[in-house]
Amino acid sequence: MTGTITAANVVGVATQAIPAGDLSDPLEAIRTGNAYVNVHSTVSPGGELRGQIK
């Protein structure tokens, strides 16, 4: 699996207080160990890879 993460890939979730398209807050969450990733693909649209980023 390959790809590039862009601001268009950031989905805003109200409970996370991260606006859609914002990369600065998600990058800070990754740096501080407070990020979770769920990678979707055409093979597994519900999520192919997921888990905490540390």
Image (cartoon, helix red, strand yellow):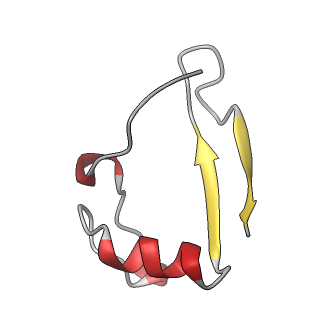
The quadrant in which residue 43 appears is top right
Nearer-the-camera pick, 12 or 4: 4
Q: In screen coordinates, is 11 left or right of 47?
A: left
**Please, which residue is most extreme toward the front here?**
31
Q: Quadrant of residue 3?
A: top left
Does 17 appear above or below 2?
below
Q: Residue shown at 29%/47% (left/top)? A: 6
Residue 14 on image: x %, y %: 39, 78
Locate the C terminus by quadrant: bottom right
Looking at the rendered structure, the number of numbered marks drawn on it comes to: 0
| Left or right: 21 as drawn, with respect to 12 | left
27 and 12: which one is in front?
Answer: 27
Q: In the picture provided, is 47 more to the left or to the right than 22?
A: right
Q: Position of residue 44 (x, y in %)?
A: 65, 22
Up-down relation of residue 23 to residue 7 (above or below): below
Residue 2 vertical placement versus 36 (above, below): above
State the residue at coordinates (39%, 84%). 17
Give how far across and how far down residue 53 sits, in percent: 70, 64
- The quarter of the displayed image where residue 20 is located: bottom left
Residue sitting at x 62%, y 55%: 37
Image quadrant containing the N terminus? top right
Residue 35 point in image, percent of width and height = 61, 71
Q: Residue visible at 43% across and 72% down?
A: 26
